[in-house]
Image (cartoon, helix red, strand yellow):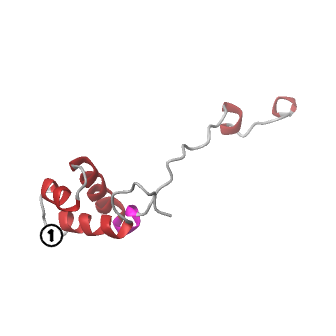
Amino acid sequence: MIHRNAPLTPTGRLRLARCVVDDGWPLRRAAERFQVSHTTAARWAGRYRRHGAAGLHDRSSRPPPLTTPDARLGGGAGAADAP
């Protein structure tokens, strides 16, 4: 599901990224053409360079779950009682 305020769909992001990376467009020109900020265009072009088309799909904005020191060490309830 695409966020209703998203400036472009994953297909549009891919088109922008290909213009910058594959066709050599300046970032500012691509940003103006696709009506996004220079920063956004740079972010999408960078993701395309690193991950290819798969890097331009929607991502969750939900933060990762917090882990406690016990969870990272493999401990948990009763871990202190173990021999």
User: Residue 30 appears at what percent x and percent y?
Assistant: 17, 60
Q: Amino acid at mark 1?
A: Asp
Side of 62 where 14 appears, left or right: left
Label 1, secondary structure: give it.
Answer: loop
Check if residue 55 falls in the magenta segment. Answer: yes
Report the label total. 1
Q: Nearer the viewer, residue 75 or 8?
A: 8
Check if residue 57 falls in the magenta segment. Answer: no
User: Residue 71 appears at what percent x and percent y?
Assistant: 70, 38
User: Residue 45 appears at what percent x and percent y?
Assistant: 26, 58
Residue lying at 19% horizontally and 67% vertically, measured from the top left: 19
Side of 11 where 61 appears, left or right: right
Q: Quadrant of the C terminus?
A: top right
Considering the whole magenta stretch, tell me its main secondary structure. Answer: helix
The answer, for residue 83, to whether it is visible in the render is: no
Residue 43 sits above or below residue 74 on the image: below
In the image, farthest residue toward the front: 4
Task: Return the residue at label 1.
Answer: 23
Give the quarter of the image for residue 52. Answer: bottom left
Residue lying at 16% horizontally and 55% vertically, measured from the top left: 27
Give the quarter of the image for residue 48. Answer: bottom left
Residue 62 sits above or below residue 50 on the image: above
Residue 58 sits above or below residue 76 on the image: below
The span picked out in magenta is 52-56
